[in-house]
Amino acid sequence: IAETDPKTEQELTLVVQTLLQQIQDKFQTMSGQIIGRIDDMSSCIDDLKKNIADFMTQAGVEELEGENKIPTTQEVKVANNLY
């Protein structure tokens, strides 16, 4: 095995370090962009939820959340009858 020239090794090391730094910088930039877009989407979803709730209120429609749920007092009675 031939020995590698120290100058060539240093140049190769410098090239690899530069490339890794460029990759890291690009990754950080892309991560920041992705997080920004996720935050934007979250805000849009929150706005949509609020608008839907407002429209439902204006239309006189109660929220459907918990429609199939048994009220708490009935849950206790059902649970007591099981034992």
Image (tube, rainbow, N blue to C red):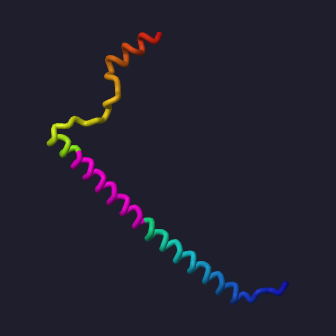
Drawn side of residue 68 relative to residue 26, left or right: left
Query: Residue 37: x and y, percent?
Result: 36, 63
Query: Residue 78: x and y, percent?
Result: 39, 15
Number of marks in picture: 0
Vertical relation: 47 (above or below) 35: above
Q: Closest to the observer: 37 or 49?
A: 49
Query: Residue 74: x and y, percent?
Result: 33, 17
Q: Is residue 28 magenta?
A: no
Q: Which quadrant of the view contains residue 81?
A: top left
Q: Residue furthest left?
A: 58
Q: Which quadrant of the view contains residue 71?
A: top left
Query: Residue 63: x and y, percent?
Result: 25, 36
- Residue at the location (21% across, 49% down)? 51
Q: Is residue 37 magenta?
A: yes
Drawn side of residue 82 relative to residue 74, left or right: right
Q: Which quadrant of the view contains residue 10?
A: bottom right
Q: Residue furthest right?
A: 1
Secondary structure mostly seen in magenta is: helix
- Residue at the location (47% across, 10% down)? 83
Drawn side of residue 30 relative to residue 9, left or right: left
Vertical relation: 55 (above or below) 11: above
- Quarter the N terminus occupies: bottom right
Drawn side of residue 55 relative to residue 39, left or right: left
Q: Closest to the observer: 42 or 24?
A: 42
Q: Closest to the observer: 71 or 15?
A: 71
- Residue at the location (32% across, 17% down)? 73
Magenta-highlighted residues: 32-52
- Residue at the location (64% across, 87% down)? 11
